[in-house]
Amino acid sequence: MPTFDPLVDTLLPTLGAVRRTLRRVGGSAFEDDALTAAQREVVLLVGRQPGRPVSEVARELGLAPNTVSTIVSRLVALGLVVRTTDPDDRRVGRLSLGPAAQARADDARRARRAVLTRALEGLDPVQVEQVRAGVGALAALVAQLEHLDRAPDAQRAGAR
Protein backbone atom coordinates (compact mmCIF):
# COMPACT_ATOMS: atom_id res chain seq x y z
CA MET A 1 0.00 0.00 0.00
CA PRO A 2 1.54 3.35 -1.01
CA THR A 3 2.21 6.02 1.58
CA PHE A 4 0.60 9.38 0.95
CA ASP A 5 2.11 11.32 3.87
CA PRO A 6 4.15 13.75 1.70
CA LEU A 7 1.14 14.40 -0.54
CA VAL A 8 -1.18 14.92 2.43
CA ASP A 9 1.39 17.19 4.10
CA THR A 10 1.54 19.44 1.03
CA LEU A 11 -2.08 19.16 -0.11
CA LEU A 12 -3.71 20.46 3.07
CA PRO A 13 -1.75 23.72 3.37
CA THR A 14 -1.80 24.30 -0.39
CA LEU A 15 -5.60 24.05 -0.61
CA GLY A 16 -5.95 26.41 2.34
CA ALA A 17 -3.42 28.85 0.84
CA VAL A 18 -5.25 28.91 -2.51
CA ARG A 19 -8.55 29.69 -0.82
CA ARG A 20 -7.16 32.32 1.56
CA THR A 21 -5.02 34.02 -1.08
CA LEU A 22 -7.84 34.13 -3.61
CA ARG A 23 -10.15 35.66 -1.01
CA ARG A 24 -7.49 38.20 0.02
CA VAL A 25 -6.45 39.18 -3.53
CA GLY A 26 -9.87 38.84 -5.14
CA GLY A 27 -11.84 40.29 -2.27
CA SER A 28 -14.65 38.98 -0.18
CA ALA A 29 -18.31 39.87 -0.54
CA PHE A 30 -18.70 39.94 3.22
CA GLU A 31 -16.08 41.01 5.70
CA ASP A 32 -14.50 38.02 7.35
CA ASP A 33 -15.28 39.29 10.84
CA ALA A 34 -18.93 40.11 10.04
CA LEU A 35 -19.97 36.49 9.39
CA THR A 36 -18.78 33.13 10.60
CA ALA A 37 -17.20 30.81 8.05
CA ALA A 38 -20.37 28.67 7.96
CA GLN A 39 -22.56 31.75 7.46
CA ARG A 40 -20.31 32.90 4.57
CA GLU A 41 -20.52 29.44 2.99
CA VAL A 42 -24.33 29.52 3.15
CA VAL A 43 -24.49 33.05 1.71
CA LEU A 44 -22.11 32.22 -1.13
CA LEU A 45 -23.90 28.98 -2.01
CA VAL A 46 -27.34 30.61 -1.95
CA GLY A 47 -25.96 33.48 -4.04
CA ARG A 48 -24.67 31.02 -6.66
CA GLN A 49 -27.79 28.87 -6.59
CA PRO A 50 -30.84 30.82 -5.40
CA GLY A 51 -34.10 29.03 -4.76
CA ARG A 52 -32.62 25.98 -3.09
CA PRO A 53 -34.26 24.63 0.06
CA VAL A 54 -32.41 24.40 3.38
CA SER A 55 -32.10 20.61 3.03
CA GLU A 56 -30.16 20.93 -0.26
CA VAL A 57 -27.92 23.67 1.13
CA ALA A 58 -27.20 21.48 4.16
CA ARG A 59 -26.40 18.47 1.96
CA GLU A 60 -24.14 20.53 -0.32
CA LEU A 61 -22.21 21.97 2.63
CA GLY A 62 -22.14 18.72 4.60
CA LEU A 63 -23.97 20.26 7.55
CA ALA A 64 -26.99 19.11 9.52
CA PRO A 65 -30.25 20.65 8.28
CA ASN A 66 -31.05 22.05 11.73
CA THR A 67 -27.62 23.75 11.78
CA VAL A 68 -28.26 25.35 8.40
CA SER A 69 -31.75 26.35 9.51
CA THR A 70 -30.24 28.15 12.52
CA ILE A 71 -27.64 29.84 10.28
CA VAL A 72 -30.36 30.88 7.83
CA SER A 73 -32.46 32.36 10.63
CA ARG A 74 -29.49 34.51 11.65
CA LEU A 75 -28.82 35.54 8.03
CA VAL A 76 -32.50 36.43 7.57
CA ALA A 77 -32.30 38.60 10.71
CA LEU A 78 -29.22 40.32 9.24
CA GLY A 79 -31.15 41.02 6.03
CA LEU A 80 -28.82 38.95 3.87
CA VAL A 81 -31.03 35.94 3.11
CA VAL A 82 -34.69 35.85 2.12
CA ARG A 83 -36.70 32.73 2.90
CA THR A 84 -39.84 32.19 0.83
CA THR A 85 -42.34 29.36 0.90
CA ASP A 86 -42.38 27.00 -2.05
CA PRO A 87 -45.78 27.50 -3.72
CA ASP A 88 -46.03 23.77 -4.52
CA ASP A 89 -45.06 22.55 -1.06
CA ARG A 90 -45.63 24.97 1.79
CA ARG A 91 -43.37 22.89 4.07
CA VAL A 92 -40.34 23.79 1.93
CA GLY A 93 -38.58 27.12 2.36
CA ARG A 94 -36.67 28.43 -0.65
CA LEU A 95 -33.61 30.57 -0.03
CA SER A 96 -32.28 33.55 -1.94
CA LEU A 97 -30.18 36.57 -1.13
CA GLY A 98 -31.63 40.00 -0.68
CA PRO A 99 -30.90 42.31 -3.64
CA ALA A 100 -27.99 44.13 -1.94
CA ALA A 101 -26.42 40.90 -0.69
CA GLN A 102 -26.81 39.28 -4.13
CA ALA A 103 -25.13 42.26 -5.79
CA ARG A 104 -22.22 42.06 -3.31
CA ALA A 105 -21.86 38.31 -3.83
CA ASP A 106 -21.98 38.69 -7.62
CA ASP A 107 -19.38 41.48 -7.56
CA ALA A 108 -17.05 39.45 -5.35
CA ARG A 109 -17.48 36.36 -7.55
CA ARG A 110 -16.63 38.41 -10.66
CA ALA A 111 -13.56 39.89 -8.93
CA ARG A 112 -12.30 36.47 -7.80
CA ARG A 113 -12.87 35.02 -11.28
CA ALA A 114 -10.94 37.93 -12.84
CA VAL A 115 -8.03 37.49 -10.40
CA LEU A 116 -7.96 33.74 -10.98
CA THR A 117 -8.02 34.28 -14.76
CA ARG A 118 -5.09 36.73 -14.54
CA ALA A 119 -3.15 34.29 -12.36
CA LEU A 120 -3.78 31.44 -14.81
CA GLU A 121 -2.63 33.67 -17.67
CA GLY A 122 0.68 34.06 -15.80
CA LEU A 123 1.32 30.32 -15.88
CA ASP A 124 2.94 28.52 -18.78
CA PRO A 125 0.63 26.32 -20.89
CA VAL A 126 1.92 23.08 -19.33
CA GLN A 127 1.10 24.38 -15.85
CA VAL A 128 -2.39 25.43 -16.99
CA GLU A 129 -2.99 21.89 -18.27
CA GLN A 130 -1.70 20.47 -14.98
CA VAL A 131 -4.15 22.69 -13.10
CA ARG A 132 -6.95 21.63 -15.45
CA ALA A 133 -6.14 17.94 -14.82
CA GLY A 134 -5.78 18.64 -11.10
CA VAL A 135 -9.28 20.10 -10.89
CA GLY A 136 -10.71 16.81 -12.12
CA ALA A 137 -8.58 14.92 -9.63
CA LEU A 138 -9.67 17.23 -6.80
CA ALA A 139 -13.31 16.67 -7.75
CA ALA A 140 -12.69 12.91 -7.53
CA LEU A 141 -11.02 13.48 -4.14
CA VAL A 142 -14.11 15.36 -2.94
CA ALA A 143 -16.27 12.42 -4.05
CA GLN A 144 -14.04 10.05 -2.05
CA LEU A 145 -14.24 12.30 1.02
CA GLU A 146 -18.03 12.41 0.70
CA HIS A 147 -18.06 8.62 0.43
CA LEU A 148 -16.05 8.42 3.67
CA ASP A 149 -18.45 10.87 5.28
CA ARG A 150 -21.37 8.57 4.46
CA ALA A 151 -19.50 5.51 5.76
CA PRO A 152 -20.52 4.05 9.12
CA ASP A 153 -18.79 5.68 12.09
CA ALA A 154 -16.76 2.54 12.82
CA GLN A 155 -15.39 2.48 9.30
CA ARG A 156 -14.51 6.21 9.46
CA ALA A 157 -12.76 5.74 12.80
CA GLY A 158 -10.63 2.98 11.29
CA ALA A 159 -9.56 5.31 8.50
CA ARG A 160 -7.99 7.74 10.93
Image (cartoon, rainbow, N blue to C red):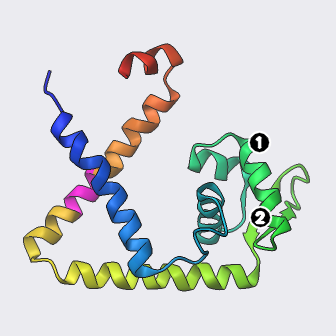
Image quarter hosting the N terminus: top left
**Which residue is drawn at the image coordinates 39% and 80% (left, top)?**
25
The three-letter amino acid code for the residue at tag 1 is Asn
**Which residue is drawn at the image coordinates 72% and 85% (left, top)?**
100
| For residue 123, side relative to residue 84 (left or right) | left
Tell me the crowding category of disc 2: few under 14, some 14 to 19, or many 20 or more residues within 10 angstroms, Cα based. Answer: many
What residue span does the magenta drawing correspond to? 132-137
Looking at the rendered structure, the secondary structure element under dot 2 is helix
| For residue 12, side relative to residue 121 (left or right) | right
Tell me the crowding category of disc 1: few under 14, some 14 to 19, or many 20 or more residues within 10 angstroms, Cα based. Answer: few
Q: Which picture quadrant has residue 112?
A: bottom left
Image spot of residue 39 (x, y percent): 66, 59
Circle number at residue 131? none
Image spot of residue 41 (x, y percent): 59, 60
Relative vertical location of residue 35 with respect to residue 66 in this rendering, above or below:
below
Tell me the residue that label 2 is attached to: 75
The three-letter amino acid code for the residue at tag 2 is Leu
Residue 13 is one of the magenta-drawn residues? no
**Which residue is drawn at the image coordinates 47% and 84% (left, top)?**
110
Q: CA distance from mark 2 to mark 1?
A: 14 Å
Residue 134 is one of the magenta-drawn residues? yes
Tell me the residue that label 1 is attached to: 66
Image quarter hosting the C terminus: top left
Q: How many marks?
A: 2
| For residue 5, side relative to residue 43 (left or right) | left
